[in-house]
């Protein structure tokens, strides 16, 4: 899991995992967890002496949330505002083309299939030729394209969650040593 070095107002330095932010504002001093909602873990001190314990509690809660919640996804779930069609995100078309040596044009949908940690795949879902194209074939092809995209999104989500939980194991070891149990 990614970490960064944070120096708080008292000058003390901490190694902080992603998803935890430092809040030092007037009379509020603590660590804010931002994963599956937000929660502030207060230092319960004005001098920062409780910051180490508060960070340990925030990290422990982060590990608990990682173990029980799906990983946040960066996949676009809704179409871009600039998209000119009403097709779902990751699906475009119909694309009309005439292949070399063919006398008729054919239509298909282009589907982007996300893969966690890898480049997305591009797939084509055939609708028909200009002679066989119908509204029913369009609807059936769109349904196949949507199912293909949803299946890829679900696999992406599972892989992202699995990767996040693997990263959390490393963090758990670091937390145990921080709390003196390692």
Image (cartoon, rainbow, N blue to C red):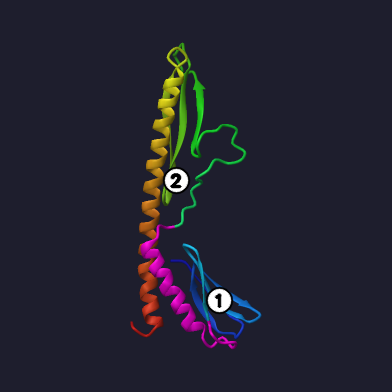
Magenta segment main secondary structure: helix
Q: Quick one: label 1 or label 2, which is nearer the N terminus?
A: 1
Q: Residue at x 51, y 33 (%)?
A: 87
Q: Position of residue 39 (x, y in %)?
A: 51, 70
**Mark pair 1, 2: CA separation:** 33 Å
Which residue is at the front of the view, 114 or 83? 83
Q: Name above or below for residue 111 compared with residue 136.
A: below
- Split into 4 quadrants, where in the image is the C terminus? bottom left
Q: Name above or below for residue 87 compared with residue 96.
A: below
Q: Which mark is residue 6?
A: 1
> How many callouts does the rendering have?
2
Instruction: Examine the image and state in which quarter residue 139 appears.
Output: top left
Was residue 50 drawn as part of the magenta stretch in this picture? yes
Q: Secondary structure at mark 1?
A: strand
Q: Position of residue 180 (x, y in %)?
A: 37, 85
Residue that carries the numbered disc 2 in the rendered image: 119
Left or right position of 148 against 40: left
- Split into 4 quadrants, where in the image is the N terminus? bottom left
Q: Which residues are magenta?
A: 43-71
Outermost residue on the right side: it is 26
């Amino acid at each position: 899991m990614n970490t960064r070095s944070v120096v708080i107002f008292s000058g003390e330095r901490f190694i902080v995992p992603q998803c935890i932010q430092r809040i030092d504002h007037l009379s509020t001093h603590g660590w804010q967890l931002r994963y599956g909602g937000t929660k502030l873990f207060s230092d319960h001190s004005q001098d920062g002496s409780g910051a180490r314990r508060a960070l340990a509690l925030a990290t422990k809660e982060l590990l608990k949330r990682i173990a029980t919640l799906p990983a946040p996804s960066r996949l676009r779930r809704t179409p871009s505002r600039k998209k000119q069609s009403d097709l779902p995100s990751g699906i475009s078309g119909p694309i009309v083309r005439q292949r070399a040596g063919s006398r008729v044009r054919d239509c298909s949908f282009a589907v982007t299939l996300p893969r966690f940690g890898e480049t997305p795949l591009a797939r084509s879902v055939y609708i028909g030729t200009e002679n066989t194209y119908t509204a029913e074939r369009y609807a059936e092809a769109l349904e196949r394209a949507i199912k293909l995209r949803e299946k890829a999104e679900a696999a992406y989500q599972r892989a992202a969650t699995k990767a996040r939980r693997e990263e959390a194991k490393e963090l758990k070891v670091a937390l145990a040593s921080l709390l003196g149990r390692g």
